[in-house]
């Protein structure tokens, strides 16, 4: 979008927050860059240039605006509905791959050479993988500086910097302030008493956001010990690269309040990325709803409660296992099966607030499970053990870098995997916004009530006009049912 100068100018002049994260405005006369909705008086058009990423602005020598804080905008929705190499690379960078494994590790995950990855990112985003990862490190450092009282040396390494000197230079360059000056400009938000080591932050999103099905789904399907709904917040344990963590997510009209307790602060950017992905916070609800609203039978559902998101997951392999456990059984039965696996094979964790006791078992731990100990029909037991074996061996890889269509094809080749299981994994684990469930009983029931075709083939044909947002249409169709997944818990 940043190449469409006239459209960018209109967005800046109208201070349209819907475009935050789509592009960034760099001001030639001041040397700063802003989000489109920056509240200051818009610069003259000939003094503005537009960039596709914060990293591109920083590479061009611009610093972040202290008023609108463009580095804290929601991520570009481009990475939500694309599965090409650039989108997959951006999801991996957000998940900390470059910080942990370098650019060669990123390229290896994607199956390309480092030169190819750098060239494609530079062409589309104006910055290479190192610059994009550096921008993320700067944002993490700012968050820790402003919300904790940690020593600067600890913050430097927690944010992923290799040295304190690099940390100091980057913060000065990006924010035009030293780390100490940045801290003195704000009053640190201290974590609640009784929970030392907990970080409190706000996760922004593009409005509108309807929390009912999003948090309702996560709460209704919560696995005891791993997830819970407490005092208006969804809480769960997280398996992270350097340790584990616990997140608490509370919906508010203009943000999601997030509290994170981490065993290793280096996991902070990854934990934030996974929370955002789980809640689908980088979606563009206006574009999605406008497309779906063109169907006159869907329009009343969208007008009634716009801004529905797709409830996703913090762990793709975990969700795949749970999807198999939930085949042809009730939500309560699926939770029971998952809870048994957690109690028998999950790793114990300490929850300062009580309630959460385990991490969901890793695929390595589940690979050693005796199939006869699984209280389920033999065919589903075989489906589950085959999936676990393929996940543990790497024959099937589920992650932010997965190619949606290739992964769906591999899942369908496994015994016991039909279109429903493969597509629900594609929708909620892989993040495919166009995944569709025409055979789902709830979808077929909703279709009949609305006057849509109720047979899978006919419904799929009708849904062609909903593309590429069919996963969001699923959320609106599910919402017609009086099921706990559709209601914010009280």
Image: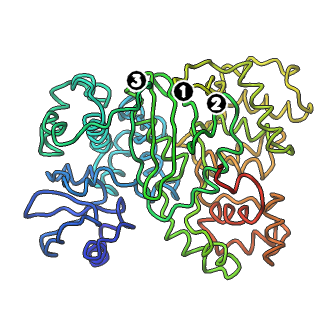
Left or right of 256: which side holds 166?
A: left
Q: Earlier in the sequence, mark 2 or mark 3?
A: 3
Residue highlighted by disc 1: 353
Q: Earlier in the sequence, mark 1 or mark 2?
A: 2
Q: Earlier in the sequence, mark 3 or mark 1?
A: 3
Q: Nearer the viewer, residue 169 or 108?
A: 169
Residue highlighted by disc 2: 226
Residue ID at (31%, 31%): 159
Element class at badge 2: loop
**Crowdedness near tag 1: few (<14), some (14–19) or many (≥20) residues, C-alpha within 10 Å:** few
Extreme left residue here?
A: 29
Alpha-carbon span between mark 3 and mark 1: 11 Å
Element class at badge 1: loop
- Report the mark closest to the observer, 2 or 3: 3
- Locate residue 110, reporting x and y percent: 48, 41
Q: Which mark, residue 196?
A: 3
Residue 226 found in image quarter: top right
**Crowdedness near tag 2: few (<14), some (14–19) or many (≥20) residues, C-alpha within 10 Å:** many
Q: Which mark, residue 323?
A: none
Q: Nearer the viewer, residue 205 or 293?
A: 205
- Locate residue 32, reporting x and y percent: 15, 57
Residue ID at (59%, 36%): 315
């Amino acid at each position: 979008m940043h190449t469409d100068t006239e459209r960018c100018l209109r967005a800046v002049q109208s201070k349209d927050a819907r475009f935050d994260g789509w592009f960034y405005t760099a001001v030639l006369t001041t040397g700063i860059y802003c989000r489109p909705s920056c509240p200051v008086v818009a610069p003259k058009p000939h003094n503005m240039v537009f960039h596709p990423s914060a990293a591109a602005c920083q590479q061009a020598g611009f610093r972040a605006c202290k008023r609108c804080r463009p580095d804290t905008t929601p991520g570009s929705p481009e990475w939500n509905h694309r599965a090409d190499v650039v989108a997959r690379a951006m999801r991996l960078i957000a998940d900390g791959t470059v910080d942990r494994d370098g650019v060669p590790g990123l390229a290896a995950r994607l199956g390309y050479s480092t030169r190819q990855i750098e060239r494609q990112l530079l062409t589309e985003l104006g910055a290479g993988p190192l610059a994009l990862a550096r921008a993320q490190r700067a944002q993490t450092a700012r968050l820790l500086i402003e919300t904790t009282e940690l020593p600067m040396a600890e913050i430097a390494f927690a944010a992923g910097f290799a040295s304190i000197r690099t940390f100091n230079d980057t913060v000065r360059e990006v924010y035009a302030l030293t780390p100490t000056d940045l801290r003195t400009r704000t009053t640190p938000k201290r974590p609640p008493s009784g929970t030392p080591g907990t970080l409190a932050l706000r996760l922004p999103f593009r409005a509108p956001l309807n929390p009912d099905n999003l948090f309702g789904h996560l709460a209704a399907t919560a696995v005891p010990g791993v997830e819970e709904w407490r005092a208006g917040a969804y809480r769960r344990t997280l398996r992270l690269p350097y340790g584990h963590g616990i997140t608490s997510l509370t919906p508010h009209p203009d943000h999601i309040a997030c509290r994170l307790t981490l065993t290793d602060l280096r996991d902070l950017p990854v934990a934030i990325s996974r929370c955002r992905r789980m809640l689908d916070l980088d979606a563009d609800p206006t574009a999605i709803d406008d497309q779906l609203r063109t169907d006159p039978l869907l329009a009343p559902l969208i007008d009634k409660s716009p801004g529905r998101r797709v409830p996703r997951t913090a762990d793709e392999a975990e969700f795949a296992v749970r999807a198999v456990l939930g085949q042809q059984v009730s939500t309560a039965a699926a939770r029971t099966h998952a809870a048994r696996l957690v109690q028998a094979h999950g790793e114990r964790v300490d929850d300062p607030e009580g309630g959460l006791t385990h991490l969901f078992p890793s695929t390595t731990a589940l690979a050693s499970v005796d199939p006869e100990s699984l209280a389920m029909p033999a065919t589903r037991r075989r489906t589950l053990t085959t999936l676990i074996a393929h996940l543990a061996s790497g024959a099937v890889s589920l992650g932010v870098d997965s190619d949606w269509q290739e992964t769906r094809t591999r899942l369908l080749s496994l015994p016991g995997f039909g279109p429903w299981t493969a597509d629900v994994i594609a929708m909620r684990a892989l993040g495919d916004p166009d995944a569709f469930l025409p055979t789902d009983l709830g979808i077929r029931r909703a279709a009949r009530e609305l006057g849509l075709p109720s047979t899978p083939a006919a419904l799929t044909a009708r849904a062609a006009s909903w593309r590429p947002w069919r996963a969001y249409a699923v959320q609106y169709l599910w919402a017609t049912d009086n099921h706990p997944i559709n209601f914010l818990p009280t």
